[in-house]
Amino acid sequence: MAAVVKCQREEVIFTSSTTQSNNLAILGLKAHGEKTGRKYIVATAIEHKAVLEPLEHLAEHGFTVTLVKPEEDGAVTAAAVAAALRPDTLMVSVMQVNNETGIIQPVEAIAKVLAKHEVFFHVDAAQGFGKRLPELQNPRIDLISISGHKIYAPKGIGALVMRRRGFERPPLTPLAYGGGQERGLRPGTLPVALIVALGKAAELAARDVEKRNKYCAAIKKEALSAFAQVGGVPNGDVTISVPSTLNIAVPGLDSEAVMLALKDIVAISNGSACTSQNYTASHVLTAMELSEDRVKGALRLSWCHLTPKVDWAAVVKAIKHTLR
């Protein structure tokens, strides 16, 4: 795990998920912020709910949170993050890759902006750990949240990287009590089998990253070609997105119609997979200020190196039939 992000072994603690890691990274700094008077946080408007909801909790308890909006291409800019900083900033939290659009966020550029600032820099790396290696190896990133199942480990295991500054680790306080495990920050009996699986998954991801990305890029090329035949419009700039995710809309069709037409061919979503049972308009696409039709018609597709070949001709045929 440590080798993937080039940190020390003792700087990794194990959690149940990225969600728990995000909560520990964000809410764990609450006491330090109150003690130092640094109660201002900068994040982005396109973060996962596992970041936005802990931030809402802090906002309810006297903290001020600024959410930086992305450009139309789906990425925030380092300049916009820099402009939002204040002397009392406690933390900047920016995801590595957006879970809905696959758009890569400028983590390295933001780390450069923060080089002379004391703020803690947190990155939700659920979508990028083991898939995009260099930016997470930047020593200016203090806290990294990691998910196991996103790199094909079992569900129920994650990690939080806490890089030291000199000899001091980030001043987190635990959210739960009752044991000294994981340096006192995540008490409870450790799920050794899941941890071993996560470690092996990280090892394989680092070893095979180029081969996996090449396979995923080929699927993405085919997907874009197929949807182009029915007028599909990508949401976000595909040139700055990961090869395993696509967010796209078909003019004239809402997402439910397309999902129904394709239900026997491919499995797709019209929102975040974590909240798809209670669909509401995507806060990510809304923050990008896309048209209402684009937001309502948005489809989310994702795949991996284990995904079998897709019958794109059947996909095109089914959508064309729906368009009649």
Image (cartoon, rainbow, N blue to C red):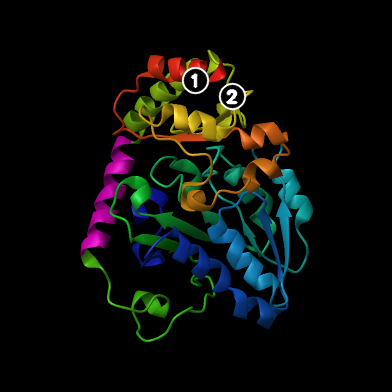
Element under label 1?
A: helix
**Disc 2 residue type?**
Val
Instruction: Determine the main secondary structure of the stretch shown in magenta.
Output: helix
Marks 1/2: CA distance?
9 Å
Residue 39, position in %: x, y? Answer: 71, 72
- Label 2 secondary element: loop
* Any part of residue 72 in sight: no
Taking depth in this image into account, of 309 and 109 the one nearest to the observer is: 309
Q: 296 above or below 169?
A: above
Q: Which image quarter is the C terminus in?
A: top right
Q: What label does residue 250 carry, if any? A: 2
Part of the protein shown in magenta: 193-208
Disc 2: CA contacts within 10 A as few (<14), some (14-19) or many (>=20): many
Q: Is residue 196 magenta?
A: yes
- The residue sitting at 53% across, 46% down in the picture is 96
Give the mark, 1 or 2, whose residue is nearer the N terminus: 2
Q: How many marks?
A: 2
- For mark 1, does the 10 Å Cα neighbourhood hold few (<14), some (14 to 19), or many (20 or more) residues? many
| Residue drawn at the location 32% of the way across and 29% of the way down | 211
Whether residue 220 is visible, yes or no, is yes
Would you say the residues marked 1 and 2 are in contact, meaning their CB atoms lie under 8 Å apart? yes
Identify residue for label 1: 319
Horizontal and vertical percent for residue 280?
Answer: 60, 49
| 190, above or below 133, in the image | below
